[in-house]
Image (cartoon, rainbow, N blue to C red):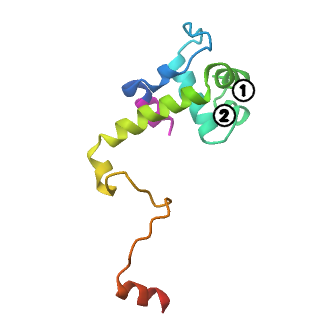
């Protein structure tokens, strides 16, 4: 998972949406790596202490928490997410599931053939 996050951050630059609230340059060394770890930390719901424990001293829980608290807002996360989603939608595989106007959880009713209905009720 970390490899995928790192590769997409490098290729798409979604990590550039994160940074200090002041808008100044980040003072975090290797900000790409730190933001990738921060996204992994909170995206997997592991939390900073758990991730730091598995990083063998490369990053502390406080550093991960600081990156999340001081450099990420809901707006910044939404912009980074939009960048990744838009890049995915440009891939050929994205069209294999339809035009993207509906999702499985949108409440749409899809008519099933009679044969399938009988098979399910049996």
Q: Residue furthest left?
A: 92
Viewer-nearest residue: 78 or 44? 78
Viewer-nearest residue: 109 or 83? 109
Q: Residues within 10 Å of mark 2 (few under 14, many from 20)?
A: many
Q: Please, what secondary structure does the residue beneath circle 1 have?
A: helix
Residue of label 1: 61
Disc sitting over residue 51 in the figure: 2
Report the residue at 44% width, 57% height from top: 103
**Which badge, 1 or 2, is on the more N-terminal residue?**
2
> Relative to residue 105, is residue 63 depicted above or below?
above
Which quadrant would residue 89 be assigned to in this image? Answer: top left
Q: Residue furthest bottom?
A: 122
Are the residues at dot 1 and dot 2 in contact (C-beta closer than 8 Å)?
yes
Viewer-nearest residue: 17 or 15? 17
Report the residue at 67% width, 19% height from top: 70
Report the residue at 69% width, 23% height from top: 69
Residue 14 x, y percent position in the rendering = 45, 26
Q: CA distance from mark 1 to mark 2?
A: 7 Å
Viewer-nearest residue: 8 or 52? 8
Q: Is residue 51 left or right of residue 23?
A: right
Residue 22 x, y percent position in the rendering = 61, 9
């Amino acid at each position: 998972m970390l490899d995928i996050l790192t590769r997409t951050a490098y290729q798409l630059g979604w990590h550039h949406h994160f940074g200090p609230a002041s808008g100044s340059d980040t003072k975090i060394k290797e900000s790409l790596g730190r933001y990738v770890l921060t996204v992994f930390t909170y995206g997997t719901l592991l939390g900073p202490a758990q991730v730091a424990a598995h990083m063998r001293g490369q990053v502390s829980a406080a550093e991960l928490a600081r990156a999340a608290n001081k450099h990420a807002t809901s707006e910044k996360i939404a912009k980074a997410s939009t960048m990744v989603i838009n890049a995915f939608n440009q891939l050929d595989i994205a069209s294999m599931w339809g035009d993207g106007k509906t999702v499985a959880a949108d409440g749409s009713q899809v008519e099933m053939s009679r044969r399938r209905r009988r098979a399910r009720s049996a």
